[in-house]
Amino acid sequence: MQLEDKFIEVKGAKIHYLEEGSGRPVVLHHGARFNAYTWKEVGTISAIAEVGYRAISIDFPGFGKSEEGNFSSLSEFIGDFMDTMKLEKPILLGASMGGEAVLGYAVDHADKLGGLILVGAVGVSYYESKLKNLDGLPILLIWGRHDTTSPKRNAELIMKYVKTAKFVNVGNQHACYLDDPEGFNSQIKDFLKGL
């Protein structure tokens, strides 16, 4: 399915996103080597829409078709984007760098979220003192079996503090959604259907 390129101004910067479906929002955040289209290419946007959610896949500032803008951090941008789009209790998905940005936002604003999907998130130990703030929030942790960029101990650290986090292995590499898109999307659909 062809998805229309959409743009919204966030703090004066033109931000690009793709959207499909209706219902509770799921905002998808890409890793450093990727962009908003990645989640379309692996079928994740459609998979989320199929189970009755509104998938919003964004290009971070300075990535893809988004302008750089003036944001102190990607975590701050996530909050600004949510506010501009008037998103109520979204589920945030973040992979690698996007996972770190989502985590950075979530540990300070867990009350504004409906859940998290973290995929090989990096930088987890930086937030260790605040991870307990996420307890009670439904969290799906998806890691490749042989992820060397973000070792499994990052996921284990989250599970140490968050009893509502569930861990699954998909594929082998860090960008595990490229190894096994079907398995990846299936885990996400099951998680969303359970919320």
Image (spheres, rainbow, N blue to C red):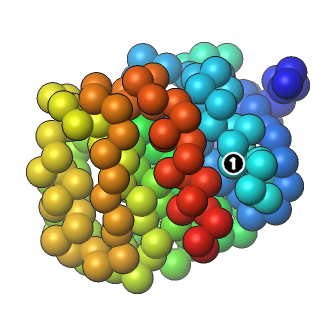
Picture coordinates of residue 102 (x, y %)? Answer: 44, 51
Which quadrant of the structure image shows residue 149? top left
40 displayed left or right of 4: left
Q: Decide: is 131 above or below 96.
A: below
Mark 1 lies on a secondary structure that is: helix
Picture coordinates of residue 105 (x, y %)? Answer: 43, 58
The residue at the point 57 percent across, 59 percent down is 190
Amino acid, disc 1: Ile
Dividing the image into 4 quarters, which one contains the N terminus?
Answer: top right
Residue sitting nearer the eye, 123 or 79 = 123
Q: Which residue is label 1 attached to? A: 48
Q: Answer whether residue 71 is visible to the viewer in this image.
A: no
Q: Answer whether residue 147 is visible to the viewer in this image.
A: yes
Assess disc 1: are there few (<14), some (14-19) or many (≥20) residues with their C-alpha within 10 Å of its C-alpha: many
150 displayed left or right of 28: left
The residue at the point 49 percent across, 39 percent down is 183
Q: Decide: is 178 above or below 162.
A: above
